[in-house]
Amino acid sequence: MRLAFMTFLITALLGLAVPVKAHHSYAGTYDGNKPVTIHGTISKLTWSNPHAHFHVDVMNQKGETTTWDVETATTIALARGGINKGDFFGQEVVVTGFLARDGTPTMAATRFTLPGLKKEFGSGKLEP
């Protein structure tokens, strides 16, 4: 009887152990008072949840390249909007969004356009 109870208890406790995925605070990470638009070429894509990320190589007037990390919507929202994983790499992109609070070349996209594919994705809102 004791063995059956212990087996039940262990099984119940293991069933309660659910992996938790942390999600950052938008307002803590991005500054809604600092809108930015960048134009460059996508060099890397991370197609995962809770948000997809792509890296954009942006060249300044001196010919120097800065790589931006762009956080966008979930992969499901992108797919529903007609954007697929294969649409990104090597494509030109214009991204509008908000800068990261930490001063790095990181932003949260509110809208982006892939001109070569004539595809656009956006939340429609221009504030976080």
Image (cartoon, rainbow, N blue to C red):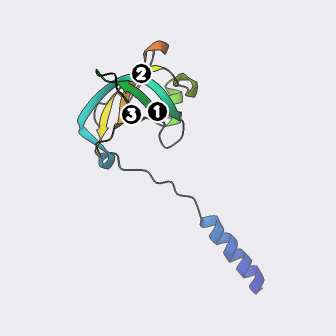
Quadrant where the N terminus is found in the figure:
bottom right
Please say if the residues under marks 2 and 3 sit with CB atoms less than 8 Å apart: no
Residue 103: % across, % down: 28, 42
Callout 2: few (<14), some (14-19), or many (20+) C-alpha neighbours within 10 Å?
many
Q: Amino acid at mark 3?
A: Trp
Secondary structure type for disc 3? strand
Tell me the tag on residue 93. Answer: 2
Secondary structure type for disc 2? strand
Residue 19: % across, % down: 57, 58
Residue 56's quadrant in the figure?
top left
Residue 15: % across, % down: 64, 65
Residue at the disc numbered 1: 54
Residue at the disc numbered 3: 68
Q: Distance between the Cα atoms at labels 2 and 3?
A: 12 Å
The residue at 77%/83% (across/down) is 3
Q: Distance between the Cα atoms at labels 3 and 1?
A: 8 Å
Callout 3: few (<14), some (14-19), or many (20+) C-alpha neighbours within 10 Å?
some
Residue 78: % across, % down: 49, 30
Mark closer to the chain start, 3 or 1:
1
Q: Is residue 110 left or right of residue 81?
A: left
